[in-house]
Amino acid sequence: MRDITGYFSSAVLVLVLAACDDDPAVSADDCAGPPEVTVTEPGAEPHEIMEHSPTAGDTATLDMRTTTEISAEVDGDRVPASPVPPMLLGMELTVDEVGDDEIAMSFVYDYGETPGGDPAVQRVLDSLVGVSGSVTTTRSGAFVDGGIDEGDLDPAMSEMVDQLEQQLAQLTIPLPAEPVGVGAAWEAASSVEIDGVTTCNFTTYRLAEFDGDDYELEVGIDQQIVPATVQEGSASVEIIEGEGHGTGRNGGSLSLPIAVSGTSEATTRMRMNVEQGGTEQEQELTVDVELEISPRE
């Protein structure tokens, strides 16, 4: 089982990194510690405590569609980027245990398809069908831990597993501990570390709709990557700087501690030095991602 160390506070946004020369470099101390939720506006009356109260055995089946566009520069020259086919991945999630403080869930990927029909991508998605894992949250929805059981997956799938683990954590939403009403706004600061790279996440939420159970949230996220040097095979990668921004909207209910619907858009850019075989290059990647999550009918 691969563990996710840290917490992703946005339910529907993928990790976004964009270079930002005007901002000072972020450090891990800027977002260290457990996630903290701060209410900035309490919203309209009546105010209620938003706490998840699922029942063990509850299930949900979700479909997640991702569309990605990538552009790249090497030493200042634009290079062709391979097109990324859209991907559709289905998940069946089950609530296993509901405690006083935490909720434990398990899941399995039960469907994978690329609408573009790319055979190589379809083979990757086929290999994920049947792969399972777990996720645990607090009763207020904050991500505690989770991971994917790689089992017999090809080690070359490691990067894909990282992305899926990020997406898994992003389905959780930290709710405020104090009573709030429609129009309420809160902020959450958190961090995640994957493969030795720490990213600070600063997320804002606005409660657009709430009927005592079902809710709709407007979400904005700013992310900064902590500069680091990592080893990728025979290449040494120095991540110089990064920052990202995205917006989205997601919905769910207090009877299940994950988002069951949502859309998001995010633009990314990351600048890094790559050294391999005595040759060094400066690379910059720009990524546009659209994500849609919907309950399967």
Image (spheres, helix red, strand yellow):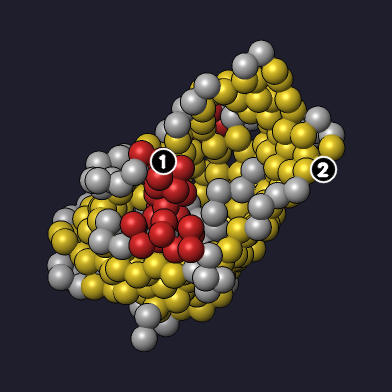
Q: Is residue 227 above or below residue 50?
A: above
Q: Which mark is residue 156?
A: 1
In the visual, does 111 lie left or right of 37?
left
Residue 179 locus on image (x, y percent): 41, 65
Quadrant of residue 34 within the rendered picture: top left
Residue at the far bottom: name it.
297
Q: Residues within 10 Å of mark 2 (few under 14, many from 20)?
A: few
Residue type pointed to by label 2: Arg
Residue 59 locus on image (x, y percent): 24, 73
Q: Residue at x 58, y 63 (%)?
A: 85
Q: Which mark is residue 6?
A: none
CA gap, disc 2 and disc 1: 27 Å
Front-most of residues 124 and 213: 124
Q: Is residue 50 above or below residue 233?
A: below
Residue linked to disc 2: 78
Q: In what element is the residue under mark 2? A: strand
Mark before the other along the chain sequence, 2 or 1: 2
Q: Residue at x 45, y 31 (%)?
A: 195
